[in-house]
Image (cartoon, rainbow, N blue to C red):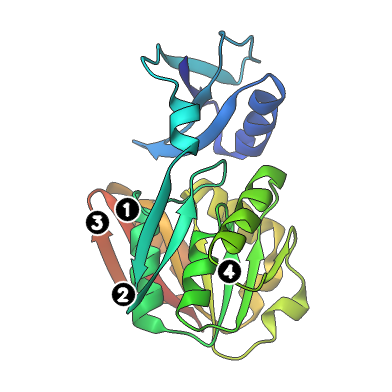
Amino acid sequence: MHFLYKISSPSKLKQGIFVLKSLGLKEVYTLEEGGKVLIGGFSDQELKVPSFLKLILKEAETINWAQDWEKETLEIPIGSTSFFLKAGPGFGDARHPTTLLCLKALEKLHPQAVLDIGSGSGILSIGAQKLGVKNVISIEIDDPSISHHRENIALNHLEENLIKKTIDSSDLTVNDQLILMNMITSEQAQIFAYTPELLKVKKKWVVSGILSEAIEEAIAKYKELGFEILAIDQLEKWVAITMEKS
């Protein structure tokens, strides 16, 4: 069964994900729709959830979605080359507009170093490596996603880059480093709140996971944090912003 839950407050997102995973929800994903933060996933039965989670969708699966999905291996073009990505628990498979926008930005900017925050499946980190970026640091807190990332590195016969759960000040000392953050805006806000050192260094950023209807609000928040907006790109209803910390 496919289930979709609305959370009472964006600040409870990580707690909601933890609770739902502990209750047995599989293939957990998040999305933002009309200003609401939603958590979806799959389970054989309906879950008894705390009051800050509200079930808004319950639908039967006519196929074994998880099993069929995990069989997929996608070839993803980037620049003059391509790489392969095995489906799995980590977010990012080049079919979602936010991921495509970030890959296009990587091609255009072609940095010397990349810090990939919320690296998920590793798609952006691996894309950077395939473009020839030698210094790639991936930040991911979810263990299944980290394992998935490492599987995709092996699939592409690449040397494993640094994958870690927290950001240290030493990670930000590299020159010509592009910071990638492909996640919904409520998660972005948590990253800035929990890692204030990110706002103390002059770096170029690409952030995605922003709905087009929320772009003006997002831009205002980034400017409040001291960012200069360099470019705005849109694909379907999603937006990516290239910006620089001044």
Query: Compared with residue 57, is residue 91 higher up or lower down, i.e. above or below?
Result: below
Query: Compared with residue 53, is residue 206 higher up or lower down, i.e. above or below?
Result: below
Q: CA distance from mark 3 to mark 1?
A: 6 Å
Which residue is at 44% across, 35% downward? 69
Q: Residues within 10 Å of mark 3 (few under 14, many from 20)?
A: some
The mark nearer the N terminus, 2 or 4, is 4
Q: CA distance from mark 1 to mark 2?
A: 16 Å
Helix, strand or loop for disc 1: helix
Q: Is residue 189 left or right of residue 172?
A: left
The mark nearer the N terminus, 1 or 4, is 1
Residue at which label 1 appears: 97
Q: CA distance from mark 2 to mark 4?
A: 34 Å
Q: List x then y, in percent, for residue 233.
A: 27, 66
Which residue is at 60% across, 23% downward? 25
Question: Pointer 3 and pointer 1: residues touching (CB < 8 Å)?
Answer: yes
Residue at which label 3 appears: 235
Residue at which label 2 appears: 231
Question: Pointer 3 and pointer 4: residues touching (CB < 8 Å)?
Answer: no
The mark nearer the N terminus, 3 or 4, is 4
Q: Residues within 10 Å of mark 2 (few under 14, many from 20)?
A: few
Which kind of residue does numbered mark 2 sit on?
Ala
Q: CA distance from mark 3 to mark 2?
A: 14 Å
Question: Pointer 1 and pointer 4: residues touching (CB < 8 Å)?
Answer: no
Closer mark to the observer between disc 2 and disc 4: 4
Residue at which label 4 appears: 157
Closer mark to the observer between disc 1 and disc 2: 1
Q: List x then y, in percent, for residue 188.
A: 54, 55
Which residue is at 47% across, 14% downward? 1
The mark nearer the N terminus, 3 or 1, is 1
Q: List x then y, in percent, for residue 240.
A: 35, 62
